[in-house]
Amino acid sequence: MASKRRCSSVSTVSSPLKSASNKWEQSPLRKRLRYASTPKKDSSSSGPKTRKTPSTPHKNTPKRKQQAESQQVEANRGEADDGEKWRSVEEEDIEPPQPRFRPGRCAGPQLNRTAHYTPLELFQLFFSATVIDTLVKNTNAYGKIKHQTQKEKWVPVTAADMYSFISLVLYMGLVPLKTLKEFWRGSELFRLPFPASVMPCRRFLAISRSLHMNDPAVEAANDQKKGTPGFDKLCKIKPLYEQILEACCTFFHPHQHISIDERMVASKARIGLKQYIRNKPTKWGFKLFVLADSVCGYTINFFVYGGRESEPTGKGAGYDAVMRLLDIPFLGKGYKLYVDNYYTSPTLFLDLLKRKIWACGTVRSNVNGFPKTKWDNVPEKTPRGTIKWIRKGELLFVRWFDTREVSMCSSIHKAYNHDVARRKVKNSDGQWTVKHVPIPGCIKDYNRYMGGVDLSDALIGYYNVLHKTHKWYKTLFYHFVDIATVNAFILHKEMCKLQSRPMLTQKRFREQLILLLAEIGSGPNRANVASRYRATIGRRVCVVCKKKSPIYCSTCHKTLCITSLRNCYSEWHRSNNICHSDTE
């Protein structure tokens, strides 16, 4: 045995050629390539092991590195091959037939197109009298239960109180402060007369603490089903959730270009519904899947993600989300849908074509159905604007090299339509110049029409009414108010375009809506206020001197004051030529 070991070691050292071949046989790369086809030897049948003679390590020369890369290329070629190759722009592609747009209803607002709607009337399309009555009923039911163990009795909420409450919620989005009580402070820094003229602070906080969207009895019955398939995670928001969804689909029909994306509603609530998305500005919160019009940003349909579906289709969560959002009555045919790589798959796009909906989106190269071809020798530093494409039946796959590689899948576009994009590059002198690089039509349209949900998010974010709360369902209530307000504003803009009249800005639209809601609201009520607070309740701001006054002209609907130092009551009426007997 010793002689055998000695001979083998001597032969290994004396023959460099044989040593190199043995090292290749024993190298990790060779083992990896032969692993699948070479069975393991049985330990009982194996002969005596020979001791490996230590050898000097080889330097990692470029030649050896190139050899290892070539072996990896050979391994990649062993993968499945679809028999196609990536083509360049010199090879002409066949343009697919373009869809004929046939919506189920006339695209745009589903309203009387000759009527002039006020901001309040548009908002009440979403927060209708039925919605307000549901909120009032459930809030009163929960308020009675909550105040049974407290000294103060629960004062029932009316529909007018709810309108005043929503008016102040919208106002707090226009004039944000750190805490809610600061809106009623009388100091020089926080002197805001409007909130106190609409509702007392104690009343607003009482409604806010008891706000409920579902019947407490229904919630209690649902809580008993925890851990069973019948448990509904979204039970606390269900009535309002369903009514807002129905209104969004009813009063607007989307144009041809639509998009689907996620939306995050910021929250740090300790509940399983909370999600984390790394590449979103709002990383923690409730995730909503949203279908929006790509042109105006109107939220057509959405749903709150509550975890895995009880009965998934097996085609992926993105597939299920798209099919659920597009399940809209009277949608029609010929739509062009834009999605990102979370949703895009050849299976989804082919199934959408069966429903006469064309689609385009970024795609991941590891998705099932993406072309697997032989290694195409793309240089490491590919020139900017290089386009590679493959057509598989009705689907087009495109790779575009900009600052990084972008992969697209489309059932709408041709590979290249001679479009160009402007890019700033440095020339040989180090100066910035503008260069025109080729760009596929699918990427150009994707950049143009994918931002429907982002536009809706931006409109919501300008005057977001969301504020801190300990209850997760109240966070979604405030978001529903945001959706209703933004959709009402978009309906206002679309109606103004149809009627060729000037439109309001979103800020001005919200200001008018707040005032109109306050007018139909309840206003301060001295009867429901503790005696120690009654001296200040009901005192509004005089329209002349801007100081507080309890005097109100019921004929002119103006707050005026009469004191030993000034008589704003008579002054205002004389300046407006109103000199009837009551004002003399």
Image (cartoon, rainbow, N blue to C red):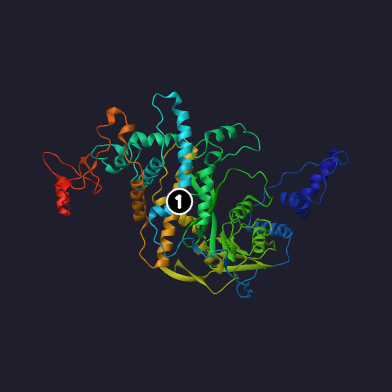
Work out which residue is located at the far front of the displayed protein and give it. Answer: 581
**Relative to the observer, which residue lies in front, 484 or 438?**
484
Q: Is residue 295 visible?
A: yes
Work out which residue is located at the far left of the displayed protein and give it. Answer: 565
Q: Residues within 10 Å of mark 1 (few under 14, many from 20)?
A: many
- Measured as percent of width and height from the top left, residue 132 is found at 45, 44
- Measured as percent of width and height from the top left, residue 75 is found at 72, 57
**Where, by quadrant of the figure, is residue 509 drawn?**
bottom left
Q: Which residue is located at x 66 percent, y 38 percent?
A: 229
Q: Is residue 136 above or below residue 355?
A: above
- Measured as percent of width and height from the top left, residue 181 is found at 33, 36
**Relative to the observer, which residue lies in front, 341 or 303?**
303
**Relative to the observer, which residue lies in front, 351 or 85?**
351
**Relative to the observer, which residue lies in front, 536 or 168?**
536
Q: Is residue 296 left or right of residue 560?
A: right
Q: Secondary structure at mark 1?
A: helix
Provide the residue designation for mark 1: 484
Residue type at mark 1 is Ala
- Measured as percent of width and height from the top left, residue 166 is found at 40, 44
Q: Is residue 136 above or below residue 502?
A: above
From the image, which quarter does the N terminus lie in?
top right
Q: Is residue 428 visible?
A: no
